[in-house]
Amino acid sequence: MVPKIDKLVNVLSTADKDVANFQVKLYDEMTTIEGLTEDGMYDATTMMATKLDLIREFFTMPNHHRKRDLIMAPVGPRSGDAIFANVERVNAELFTLTYGATVRQLLTDLEEVEEVNKQLDQMGYNIGIRLIDEFLAKSNVTRCVDFRETAEVIAKVGFKMFLGVTATVSNWDADGTCCSIILEDNPLVDFVELPDTCRGLYYCNILSGVIRGALEMVSMKTEVTWIRDVLRGDDAYELQVKLLKQVPEEYPYKDDE
Amino acid sequence: MGREVSESCVDSLLTEIVSTYNNRFYANKPELAARRIEAIGYQVGHQLSERYTMERPRFSDHLEAIKFICKDFWSELFKKQIDNLKTNHRGTFVLQDNRFRWLSRISTDPSVENTESQDPSAAAESKASLATMHVYFPCGIIRGALSNLGILCAVSADISNLPACKELLLSYSVLSFYGI
């Protein structure tokens, strides 16, 4: 055995030794990146270990970029179906009925339909600002290049991984800052019929709040309004999402200091 | 198996219901918040038990109905049965779920957690009070489900037996109810 190993060392060029050195350091470097899971570290190390140019680049860039460009990207975004198949799921009836009972209780307590709309939106917002973390962690999505991509990701991945349904995106305006997310199938409204006394109620208003809250956590101020609602006699659920302002990220990144 | 949604949907919604009623609407009146949350649960339990008993014969006595809650009904909701059922044969039943999902992920205020080393009982107490708001919904569900089966009852939960553990996990809960 020993002679074999000697031979091996002998044929290594200086450049190869560099690689070996880098590879040893790689894992240590990885551990300094916040928010990277053990699996992610393993995947990234295996992927990069054979690509010298990638490793060299890796050592010269700040943590923020490493995570985005080298680690998240190669693993690749996962499809909504794949994520939904792997998350813990529960009986949708429980969810639908709990939401229904909540709306009903809010109507009793607040009396004004307008106020109920407002509270549902607020509840959604609060859920959205927490749910975005789970979304980013499980979906592996990379930074969206524009708002068009953002809308597609919400419709195809976001809705699917939480509610198990997909939505479609359409009705873009000319500058790509306003679109419609259309939902044909909506688990929130199974078994629901609205009585005449609830005219003016946006029953699914929690959804618009969730989208607004989640996008705000990734630096996008949006306005989300209902355009069509099956419970009001339309043929689908249509949410208009309008990008108001994109809060620029602070640069230079400070996490290396 | 019918339609499913991600468990986070239900978790997020329940957390938000508790926070809406307990922290926003009735910030200083926990008993009012509790009543509203229980009412939401009651409504849900009532409707669910109507759905789950559609194709069943009528239950012959209370024990049969309660066994149904412990087995089929609980399995539909939590994919597991109640771990233990006790009764004094005079209308009181105690249902025990050793790993109750809706309490298993409650974390406590980190500032309280820091003091745990000095006073573990105080930390356990704060866990319990935080968890208390989260038991009204399941209590309501059971009361609603039984009321749909023709059993009027009061349901209360006891989570005081939480083990004084260091993890941020509440893994032990007892739901008991008293038939009238």
Image: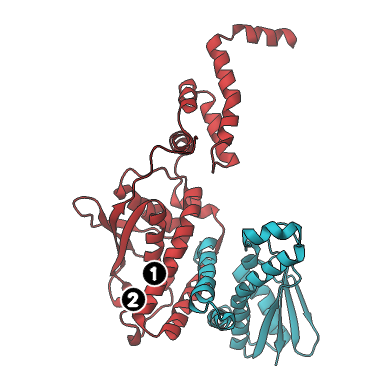
Looking at the image, the residue that sits furthest to the bottom is B180
Which type of secondary structure does the marked residue at label 2 adopt? helix
- Residue A241 position, x and y percent, is 30, 59
CA distance for labels 2 and 1: 17 Å
- What chain is colored cyan? B
Asked if A142 appears above or below B170 in the picture, the reply is: above
- What chain is colored red? A
Q: Which residue was labeled with disc 2?
A: A231
Is residue B62 in view from this perspective?
yes
Badge 2 crowding class, 10 Å Cα cut-off, few under 14, some 14 to 19, many 20 or more, is: some
Quadrant in which the N terminus of chain A appears: top right
| Amino acid type shown at disc 2 | Leu
Who's the residue at 48% across and 72% down the image?
A96
Chain of the residue where label 2 is placed in the rendered structure: A
Q: Which residue was labeled with disc 1?
A: A121
Q: Is residue A175 left or right of residue A144?
A: left
Going from N to C along the chain, the mark reached first, 2 or 1, is 1
